[in-house]
Image (spheres, grey):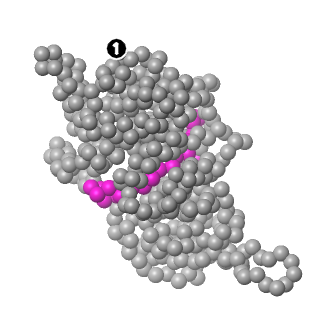
Amino acid sequence: MLHSLTLPASWHSLLSVLRPVFRRSSTFAVFALLATGLVAQAMRRTVVGMLAGTGMAAIVSFHTCCRFFSHHTWDADPLGLAVARLVVSRLLPENAAIEVVVDDTLFRRWGPKVFGAFWTHDGSAQDPNALGRGNRWIIVGIVVALPFSSRPVCLPVLLRLWRGKGTASPVQLAAELISLLANEFPERIIHTVGDAAYHGKALLIAGTTITTRLPANAALYAPTPPRTRRRGRPRLKGDRLGTPAELAATAHWRTTTGSRYGERTTVQAAVIDGLWYGAFGNTRGRIVLVRDPDADTMLALFTTDLDSAAEAIIAGYAHRWPIETAIAAGKQLLGIGQARNRLQRAVERTVPFGFVVYSLVVVWYALHGHHPDDLATRRRGQPWYRRKDDIAFEDMLAKLRRTLAAARITGVPAAQPDPDKYRDYELACAAAAA
């Protein structure tokens, strides 16, 4: 099957790294086929759309593609860990710490027979209190700095489907995913960042740290005092420090400059050793208060990272934002979540499959696709796009589509031109210029 699909050598070599994940070569062939189809298809990315994107609908059965998600023997966790190994080995410095971001998102689904669909909070809705029915996914991604981008990029690698009330909470599911990464990279420290929803003792994992935003009503305490010789149970926490606002009133502030969201900014910061007893028990941590001198706003963070400087913790928390852009780009540009599966195994596999392909597109562009003239070419083609100063996922996806279309064209014998392939190339070029 795979030998009938003409692929660029760079994309084929990248997919081949994942071959050991699949027990059978035929299953890997379907994976490579659907991954290529998901990238090449510029319209609707259902399972039929993925197959149509490869141009092999007349050769490969639609049922084979559906059964890949619902019945074939493979697991999303080993696939995500294989991509994580690829990312760490190719895009991170040797022995560097791994920055991990955790978040969740809702893929709206309809129908009474869709597995794992519940009414839950929809963070992507305009109304902050909006509810939606669908599959809620907890996502863990690795943050990398690419040499051609001034902003960090998040590459989703591991996902978990929330099964509803009475089952493992999103925090517990996030802890499972972080533990998988910690076991996969025992020689590296993992710094995890999450929003205010991700706190709790489940996230206290050996070899990792957690940084999260403090709620306004968080009760903070001084570190555990040393034991005395008096009778009775020793104290688990020190004196009450107060809420973040109360701490800010008496904190010692200092001005610091650091990188946040791809820009150098000057802020005032204060660091206090303490405990967030209600969330992490008597585990010692640090409260990092950040405020903008020109605005009446303050950000309060709690971290179990006792070694990094305040500037690194502030910058690390700012690296949480790339997972938001990755989720948005995955949904809008790659069509993740458009496949309408209902069976349990199909639902549990399709969205992780899509985000694995998302990460592979970024890795392909970083290793093989980038050219210094890419940004200038985009600006010349769209002179009204004046504020574009970075390569976006849309640019990476468009270039890979053009590369796939060009490989299909050059694979056609000159005596037997295929007009459909030339049309695919025109559509790829149009998508790049859109």
Q: Residue 35 location, x and y as percent?
A: 39, 32
The front one of 403 and 179 is 179
Q: Residue 410 location, x and y as percent?
A: 18, 27
Quick check: is 140 in the magenta stretch?
Answer: yes
Say which residue appears at 80% left-offset and 77% top-offset.
Answer: 234
Dot 1 corresponds to which residue? 58
Q: How many marks?
A: 1
Residue 257 location, quadrant: bottom left
Say which residue appears at 40% left-offset and 50% top-offset.
Answer: 87
The front one of 46 and 176 is 176
The amino acid type found where label 1 is placed reads Ala
From what the image shows, is residue 88 above or below residue 43? below
Q: Residue 313 location, x and y as percent?
A: 48, 68
Quick check: is 315 in the magenta stretch?
Answer: no
Farthest residue to the left: give it: 415
For label 1, count other residues whose C-alpha is less than 10 Å away and answer few (under 14), some (14-19) or many (20+): few
Specify the segment rendered in magenta. Answer: 124-152
SS category of the residue bearing label 1: loop
Q: Is residue 418 visible?
A: yes
- Please state if 360 lies on the left or on the right of 424 as rendered: right
Residue 403 location, quadrant: top left
The front one of 105 and 231 is 231
Say which residue appears at 17% left-offset and 42% top-offset.
Answer: 381
Q: Is residue 328 visible?
A: no
Q: Residue 173 location, x and y as percent?
A: 61, 47
